[in-house]
Amino acid sequence: LKPFSGVVDFLPAVHEARPRFCIMMDATNAVHAVLPYGVDLAATHLAYGRYGEVRTVSRLEGMPERARIVFFDVRSAAKAVEALGQAYCTPGPQSGCRTVRLAGSVDVDIDDLPSISGIHSDSGGGEYTLEFY
């Protein structure tokens, strides 16, 4: 397939056609969760895998009854928070970078569009930033 040029101009059409394609700059791929007594990190990793692919699980420093679960995809973290509720699972600080800044002349391959949550153009039009789920 050919790379898709004019991706910034294409954003409104993509947004209308695919509602899940949205701007998520404040979304996060990490959650903080309460650990039930006696549950270890391996079991936590497995349990949270039902919401999406888990990157890491670790205990929060100074809070052995809470864990930080980092997913590869922000949508997985959102699913965990929605399913478990804010009393048990809350969004945590983002782990890693989900954006890349590109020159306006760089094409985006159409196969990459499902992984892109937002496209932000600078005011001059010379560059744009891709945000990934």
Image: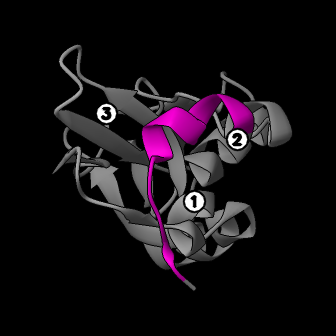
Give the percent coordinates (x, y) of residue 126. Answer: 16, 33
Mark closest to the chain's N terminus, 3 or 2: 2
Q: Which residue is mark 3?
A: 93
The amino acid type found where label 2 is placed reads: Val
Check disc 3: other Cα within 10 Å, few if <14, some if 14-19, many if 20+: some
Q: Nearer the viewer, residue 61 or 126?
A: 126
Residue 121 forms part of the magenta stretch: no
- Report the Cα–Cα distance between label 3 and label 2: 28 Å
Q: Is residue 86 above or below residue 131?
A: above
Most foreground residue, 120 or 58 = 120
Nearest to viewer (mark 3 / mark 2): 2
Task: Say which residue label 1 marks.
Answer: 113
* Magenta stretch: includes residue 12: yes
As displayed, is residue 49 above or below residue 15?
Answer: below
Do we see residue 40 in this rendering? no
**Residue positioned 76% across, 34% down in the render:** 82
Q: Earlier in the sequence, mark 3 or mark 1?
A: 3
Q: Is 84 or 54 nearer to us in this picture?
A: 54
Which residue is the site of mark 2? 14
Identify the magenta region: 2-13
* Residue at the (80%, 43%) spot, across then down: 18
- The secondary element bearing badge 1 is classed as helix
Give coordinates of residue 19: x percent, y percent: 80, 35
Label 1: how many residues lie within 10 Å, few (<14), some (14-19) or many (20+)? some
Looking at the image, residue 108 sits to the left or right of residue 127; the answer is right
Q: In this orientation, does residue 22 appear?
A: yes
Q: Position of residue 31 (x, y in %)?
A: 48, 41
Residue at position x 70%, y 41% in the image: 14
Circles 1 and 2 in contact, beta carbons < 8 Å? yes
CA separation, marks 1 and 2?
9 Å
